[in-house]
Amino acid sequence: MGGLMEKTLVLVKPDGVQRGLIGEVISRLERRGLKLQAAKFMQVSNELAETHYGIHKGKTFYEGLIQYITSSPVMAMVWTGPNAVAAVRQTMGATRPTESAPGSVRHDFGLEVGRNLTHASDSPENGETEVSLWFNDSELIDWDRAVDNWIFE
């Protein structure tokens, strides 16, 4: 298979869940050619939120971010494929929806940075770290799709 195989964490955040966009996100990533390796619908604990967003601790928006991500369930997923991190980020769009490319999830459905629908790992290294934070190894399913030979070189 061509390209570097990567894992990336994708969250459909509370606003995306409440707006019924889980299926839209999954559909776009599947059509892009990425493979779902794990998924769970969950309520985020304060502890998980604080660990995940620890890099932002002390910033003015931190408390609001923790309240927001724990306010309603999220759909947490692991997607894999060649250059998965970049492919997912391109599909989701820029963090600020108004700066996102037309056709991206955030461009098509988002208006404000504080309600930008999804989270996607920003580097292969962070993808690995975030996947291990949100999922146990036993939750990651390694499987083959018949269509992979038609998607990957």
Image (tube, rainbow, N blue to C red):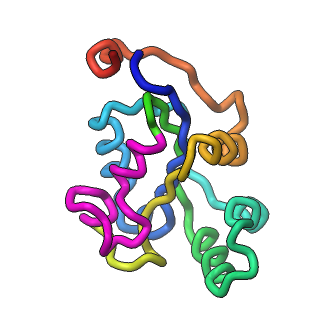
Q: Is residue 150 above or below residue 23?
A: above
Residue at x-position 59% and y-position 69%: 69
Q: Is residue 104 above or below residue 86?
A: below
* Residue sitting at the far front: 3
What range of the chain is rendered magenta? Answer: 85-108
Find residue 63 and report its horizontal and vertical position in percent: 68, 82
Find residue 51 and report its horizontal and vertical position in percent: 76, 61
Q: Nearer the viewer, residue 87 or 15?
A: 87
Find residue 115 and report its horizontal and vertical position in percent: 44, 74
Q: Nearer the viewer, residue 148 or 76?
A: 148
Magenta-span inclusion, residue 131:
no
Find residue 140 and report its horizontal and vertical position in percent: 62, 29
* Residue sitting at the far right: 47
- Image label count: 0
* Residue sitting at the far left: 102
**Res 153 → quadrant:** top left
Left-right relation of 80 to 33: right
Magenta-span inclusion, residue 96:
yes
Main SS of the magenta part reads: helix
Residue at x-position 70% and y-position 64%: 49
Left-right relation of 55 to 110: right
Residue at x-position 50% and y-position 67%: 14
Residue at x-position 43% and y-position 44%: 86
**Res 145 → quadrant:** top left
Q: For the N terminus, give its image quadrant.
A: top left
